Amino acid sequence: MNNRHLNVKEDDLYSGYNDYNPLFDCKELENDASFQDTTKSNQGKRIHLQPINGQLADSTTAGRPLTSSSGCRTPMPSSVSRPMTAAVQSGAARPMSAISAAGYSSSPTRSCSNFDPLGQCRGPAPPLEEKKDDTPEEKIKLLEKNVNDLITESCMAQSMGNSQLALEKAREAGRKERALGRQREQSGNAEQINVDLTYAVLLNLANQYENNEMYPEALNSYQIIIKDKMFANAGRLKVNMANIWVKQKNYPKAIKLYRMALDHISDDYKEMRIKIMQNIGTVFVLLGKYSDAVASFEHIMSKSANVRTAYNLVLCYYAIRDADGMRNAFHKLLAIPLHLQHEDKYIAATDDIKSNMLLEVIKNDKLHKMERDLKARADNYVMTSAKLIAPAIEASFAAGFDWCVDTVKNSPYAELANDLQLKKAMTFFRQMQFDQAMKILKEVAKQDSRVKSAAANNLSSLFILEKDYKQAEHYADLAINADRYNPGAFVCKGNTEFVKQDYVKAAEFFKEALRNDSSCTEALRNLGLTYKKLNRLEDALDCFLKLHAILRDSAEVMYQLADTYELLEDTHQAVEWLMQVISVVPNDPKALAKLGDLHDLEGDKSQALHYYCESFRLFPCNMEVIEWLAAYYVQTQLYEKAIHYFERAILMQPSEVRWQLMVASCQRRSGNSQKALETCKEIHRKFPEDLQCLRFLVRLCQDMGFKEVHDYTSKLKKVEKMKELREQRAKADREGSTRNRRTDSTDATTTGERGVAPVMSLPASGEPFETSGSPKELDASYADPLGPLANQPRTGGVKKRVEDDVFAGEDVGDELLPD
């Protein structure tokens, strides 16, 4: 019964967890004589017991007393002893894990009787110790971070185009890095240097020196990196040094450094070695050593052929005039695969909307753009190479070009054959072989190819220059039908309509060309000139202003703007635009004359004289300028200077009597009557029937009292009588022809009778010739040849509008070919 208990109360869920073997009780070890004797062994060792919370524990471990469930303490035999592993926490005894579960105890000695597996009843954790920034390690880490930040800022500044700021940041990073090295030495950690950081600082500084064109400093920085043995693979930077020597045009030293860099790069880095070999070949070309460049490029072609190297090889063989080498290099250029996808894959083959949208996205992505650029560059290399070597590989240019065309037709670049034919035609034009060029263009225009429209467009332009407007219109229509988006074709079509003076239709074609290409300068210029013909000056001004926005330095466009403003009677704006023309082409006599004319209209005679004199100095054959200057000096009574310009007019128009009479008049007005008389006699000898010269001679002889006045008076009468007879005969002829036309137009068809007109018969021989009316008095009045110039005020100057033809220079049509 002693071992049975009645369940009066509920069972304790935690009972039995504190039961343990009494042998582990160490509470009374201090009073245990046997244990104390055991500690005093023959070796003299003693285990010191230290009181912990009023209890004893080993000096190496922390323990707690073991009690039984009844609370009694049993002394542990001296022969059984073990170190205690349980620790006392916050004054509460934690049961050993071998006996009871952690956190479950019914002992009244625990400070917290509730279930607390996280130990929250113990209160908040103590605060963390503050990190001290003044320690050497922390200072070194902070400096390293600052150096890295400065390198990043330097690179970012360079990427944004601010090279000066990038250099300043790189220099500051260098100073910080040196301070970091001194800090490591002071802290005794000199052997822990960050090699990568030092390399990054020096390399960035060298790059920024190079970007700022401080080449000696950059070379010095690179040299520091290369000489330092702790930097592995630093020999590759000799490529950067070689690039700097190339910029300084020290080509032998650049080649030496390129070759030294090759020695530091293993064969595993094939692409890098190829690029360095390309640089070596390019430097040999700059040195003019084309044979050495050929060796470098041939080596590259044997290892890793590419389009650029093949093109350079063609150029080098052309430089040394090796025809066989040019042919072989051209074959190699055509044989290099581009590894590009065919354009047909971007054509929608189904009606699936999602697939079509995906194709549209792929068609315009960056990868496809890169492929197009690569293809365009390769096509340009092929076209340029063929154009270059064609005259050199055969005895004649035509034979060489035919070989190139045949070779291209049998290569992956077969679509370029027609482009080469157009190049051939343009070369024939430059050689003045127009028949051959026209023949080639006509052959290409008959083919169904992408260059058909360009060939027809060129033919139309040529026929316009030859003024065969019917053929020009035919080929313009052919070009439009072949390619509705060819602006040059519409320009040619508009030109043909302009020639037929159908300006409205011409303007429509020019507008269509601009709708296809808003930057087509030929269409915009011709449209402006067409609007001037239609007297739509505001629209013409708008066209020329747009053209000026595209062609900022075009003197022709500025002149058209000035002329349009003049037609709009805005003289101030016209002068401003002409001043811009003079700033671009200061030696244009036409613009200078126009400036003089405008200043004369405004009444500024001094400025007008200045610009007219400059125009005459540059082009002394402009009759308008000569006339204005002569008239100006006559008005200012500077007759000697006026004689100079009249003599120039005589050289320009030797059959014009008035210039010679003006010279004589200037001589008379200047007081040299004898010289004027001699001049008039010379004029009379050349032009004996000139009435004004005879009147001038009569007047001069009368003033000077010479007896020759009677001879010249009689000559003047005869000349006037002959002139009167000529006028009468001319008048009679006109009246007779009028009567004949009137008689023929009367009722000859109704009566059938032919009307008889009176016939005027000349007087018979011996009969006097009677004239109707009384004889006229002799008109011997003198008229000064300088009268209109000297007496009448000059209000407008010599003014003539410049109507530019729509087909000026090379602006006809549009040659849709690359150079």
Image (spheres, rainbow, N blue to C red):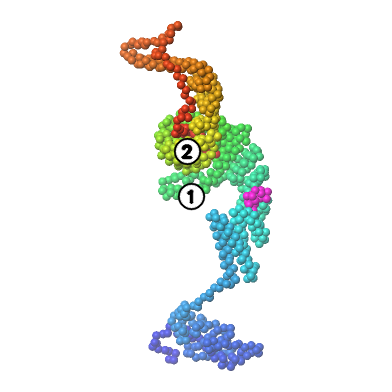
Asked if residue 459 shows in the view, the reply is no
- Kindly identify which residue carries mark 2: 604
Question: Helix, strand, or loop for circle 2?
Answer: loop
Q: Is residue 188 magenta?
A: no
From the viewer's side, name the closer residue of 471 and 335.
Answer: 471
Which residue shows up at 62% across the image and 54% down it?
214
Which of 727 and 421 lies nearest the eye of the viewer? 727
Question: The magenta stretch spans which residues?
Answer: 241-255
User: Would residue 67 appear left or right of 246 to someone viewing this image?
Assistant: left
x%, y% of residue 679? 54, 23
Main SS, magenta residues: helix
Residue type at mark 1: give it.
Answer: Asp
Please tell me which residue is depicted at 45% across the width and 32% down the height of the picture. Answer: 793
Quarter residue 568 falls in: top left
Which element carries disc 1, helix, strand or loop?
loop
Q: Earlier in the sequence, mark 1 or mark 2?
A: 1
In depth, the one of 26 and 683 nearer the eye is: 683
Up/down of 689 relative to 216, above or below: above
Mark 1 vs mark 2: give the one in front.
2
State how far apart marks 1 and 2 are (Cα).
Answer: 63 Å
Location of residue 185 with respect to 67 vertically, above or below:
above
Work out which quarter of the rendered image holds the C terminus and state it.
Answer: top right
Query: Pointer 2: residues within 10 angstroms few (<14), some, or many (20+)?
Result: few
Tell me which residue sits at (46%, 78%) in the image: 120
Q: Quadrant of the N terminus?
A: bottom left
Any mark on residue 456, and which?
none
- Location of residue 538 in the rendering, given as x and y in whole percent from the top left corner: 41, 39
Which residue position holds label 1?
365
